[in-house]
Amino acid sequence: MRQHTIVQKILVTMTLLCGISFALQAHNVYATFTSIEWNPDDKSVELVLQMHAHELEAHLSLDLDERLTFLNDADYPKLEAAVGPVMHKMVALELDDQFTEVTYLGMEMQGQTVFIYMETGWPTPPKKIKFMNALFIDELPGQNNSVMAQVNGVRRAGEILAGTGPAVMNF
């Protein structure tokens, strides 16, 4: 009976060690999500980028050469001011094979999620959307920048990974 208990303890310990080892080998998943929608009311294409605050604050801190965090209210204005120029560098949008300048409108936080708002004028429903979000692609292993676009109720989706280039969605 005593040997049986020792064997059980050894098996439980080995199971726990295997579980811990597996958890240590797992890697973080880094992702952003962009929603693109043609708005027929104001003849514009609206973009909303969504991401975890930690990755964005780390990227902005490197750009600004200063450690900043969304957890510190005093840092928020600097972080918010830095987002527009970064989006201008990292995001590209083509509508019907024409490059379009996207205007940064602002950002907000909900919990640990950052929402970034942008738009561009576009008079008719686009038949083709080509979108590139290079944010974090070269910085974080396994970064996945997903995108979903909607035009007149039709949805298309794509993903941008290291080495894949822009997502192209035809309507």
Image (spheres, helix red, strand yellow):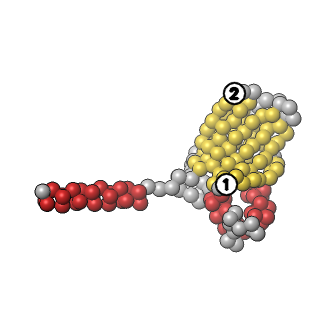
Q: Residue at x 27, y 57 (%)?
A: 12
Which mark, by number, is residue 5?
none
Point out residue 151 in the picture as x, y percentages from the top left corner: 74, 30
Name which quarter of the figure residue 112 lies in: bottom right
Which mark, by number, is residue 154?
2
Q: Residue at x 53, y 52 (%)?
A: 29
Q: Secondary structure at mark 2?
A: strand
Point out residue 148 in the picture as x, y percentages from the top left corner: 66, 37
107 or 95: which is nearer to us?
107
* Picture quarter with the C terminus: top right
Amino acid at the residue labelled 1: Gly
State whether residue 24 appears in this view: yes
- Rate crowding at label 2 as few (under 14), some (14 to 19) or many (20 or more) other CA atoms within 10 Å: few
91 or 21: which is nearer to us?
21
* Picture quarter with the N terminus: bottom left
Which mark, by number, is residue 111?
1
Image height of 167 relative to 15, above or below: above
**Do labels 2 and 1 touch, CB within 8 Å?**
no
State whether residue 98 appears in this view: no
Point out residue 65 in the picture as x, y percentages from the top left corner: 70, 72
Q: Secondary structure at mark 1?
A: loop
Q: Is residue 169 left or right of residue 125?
A: left
Amino acid at the residue labelled 2: Val
Q: Residue at x 79, y 38 (%)?
A: 45
Label 2 to label 1, Cα distance in Å? 30 Å
In the image as oriented, which residue stretches furthest toward the front? Answer: 1
Point out residue 167 in the picture as x, y percentages from the top left corner: 64, 40
Comes first in the chain, label 2 or label 1: 1
